[in-house]
Amino acid sequence: MLHARSYRLILAVAVIAAVLPLLLPGGYALHLAAVIGINTIVVLGLNLLMGYAGQVSLGQAAFVGIGSYASGILAAKAGLSPWLAMATGVTLAATTGAVVGIPLLKLRGHYLAMGTLGFGMIVYIVLRQWNSLTGGTIGIMSIPPLTIGGFAIDTELRMYYFVAFSVILALALASNIIDSRVGRAMRAVHGSEVAAETCGVHTARYKLQVFVLSAALAGYAGSLHAHHATYIHPGTFGFQYSIHLVVMAVLGGMASVWGAVFGAAAVTLIGENLRSFQEFSTVAFGFVLIVIMIFLPAGLWRGIGDIIQRTARLSQQRRRGTRHV
Amino acid sequence: MIPPAAYLLQYIVSGITLGSIYGMIALGFTLIHNATGIVNFAQGEFVTYGALIAITCSATFGLPMPLALLVAVIMVTVLGAILERLAIRPAHRSSVITLIIITIGASILLRGIAMWLWGPDALPMRHFSGEIPMRLGAVAVLPQHIWIMGIVVCTMICLWLLGEKTQVGKAMRACAMDREAAQLVGIPAARMVTLSFALSGTLGGLAGAIVAPLAMGQYNMGIMLGLKGFAAAILGGMGNPVGAVIGGVLLGVLESLGAGLESGFKDAIAFGVMLVVLLAKPTGIMGGKSH
């Protein structure tokens, strides 16, 4: 059940998303908006996994890659219907998540982080090396667009709306989960696995479910990316992207669905704007990351919200004369 | 016609050389992990800076090699201490994820600075004593290989002496064993943490400086080296210094033999090994701390 407030917020986002193209200065901005949307979907899954269930994944790019390449290989090379390819991609990503998650989720903390990192690196290397299947470092080109009847989603505008629609669905899904019994169980696991177990929460099962869900979302986003960019190559799905995704999740704020949107938008836009200053962007990125983690570990969304709240309270106290310092 | 056994020996020798580098990097991880319980994702950048500073000193400033090495190692040691003071200390009460992200941020920052200072291209470094291979039986060994193995062995001995025979070293070990108990007997734990980062910088920087003639120096060399060093630490047993070195050498040999078979997949060997260890016996070969 969606709380009324979440429902209203999502509706507001939907309205904004619907009219956004009218405000944007053209094709490239729409392209960027779609990229932000695709990243948001992955980060939502990561948010659930890291922020709510308290696990870590430094290899999420692998699931995005699986989804992308499933769409690419099946739709472009094998001529399958793009929708079928997409469904296969999502299923494949989810299944991989399950198969890998069962042994990996027995690890904790740093070991889980490194385990997911190792998994991510192996998938990347396989995508890069398996020339006959994936096209190796060259990748796959001319990926056909998604079509509904005779209507092809092959312009930036149409792709933007499809991505926006997907993001709304993903937001609704995530909000729904968080406010449900499953969400509470996840938060219990995050708080203390031992305590959760004693309350009858089957922690292993929930951890796996969240992991698989985040993998499925990432796979879906990967499919979207394949049809959006129409060209995919392994370089996109390496360690760097996995780290960027984690940064988006953490920067936005892990215990917040809206943090995912904010984080994805912030990191994507900053990356875009600093593209011309290559070295400076990396330096600034790392510096900002460190500073925010030290001072606002709950992420920017929460952190800025907290600061605003505190300032409001302070000024209110001063006005009333109830401030004792 | 060179007999296949000689190829094998050749791969093993280069594997041991590479592995000793991995071992040094793994030791750096172990030092910090023992002192603080965190994984320092910026470890690889220590290697990068060691290599690039040594290259600049010897090629650009024309310093003699021993001096170039010394300067490089000292600067990276200081870098390690600075990293701890500015990025780790302020967040020492934070969660595991936060600390991981901070060290990731530090590695991104350092990598960016390296690219800014040295550019994106790979830079060569002069071999310490020439490039004429020596023949030991059927195996060709470069002088640099001998340098690497020799320096690594000396470093291990020095570290052992530090830990066994000096006050500071014993204090660091005490801190690693039980931080609170160490504080109770008057050991300044915070300073030991800074020291462990500094020492980790020493190891990483030295590793970078001595491998640069073979691997060249580039702003992004630290990523793979750091990750593989970590894989080596896990293989040998996280938290176990002897294990770190053994894990490193073993990983180097495995990788070298694997590259003889299918070079493109070479990088996957380290991660595959790491995954197998994590899933089968997380405490590694020598049995480190289980968490």
Image (tube, rainbow, N blue to C red):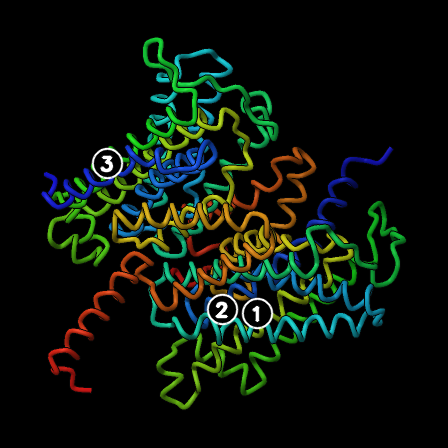
Q: Is residue B176 above or below residue A258?
A: below
Q: Quadrant of residue A192?
A: bottom left
Q: Nearer the viewer, mark 2 or mark 3?
A: 3
Identify which amino acid the numbered label 1 is placed on: Ser
Closer to us: mark 3 or mark 1? 3
Image coords of residue A56 (percent x, y): 36, 50
The answer to which of marks 2 and 1 sits earlier in the sequence is: 2
Numbered circle sitting on residue A15 = 3
Q: Nearer the viewer, residue B260 or A175?
A: A175
Q: Are marks 3 and 1 in contact (CB under 8 Å)?
A: no
| Chain letter of the residue carrying label 2 | B
Q: Is residue A99 visible?
A: no
Instruction: Say which of A311 and B61 sits in front.
Output: A311
The extreme top residue here reads A150
Location of mark 2 (residue): B32
Question: Of helix, strand and loop, which one carries label 2?
Answer: helix
Q: Secondary structure at mark 3?
A: helix
Q: Nearer the viewer, residue A77 or B22?
A: A77
Chain letter of the residue carrying label 1: B
* SS class, disc 1: helix
Identify residue type, mark 2: Ile
Query: Which residue does the numbered mark 1 point to in the structure image?
Result: B200
Give the side of residue B69 with respect to residue A14, left or right.
right
Instruction: Locate the N terminus of chain B and report the quarter of the image it occupies.
Output: top right
Q: Quadrant of the C terminus of chain B?
A: bottom left
Question: What amino acid type is highlighted by mark number 3?
Answer: Val
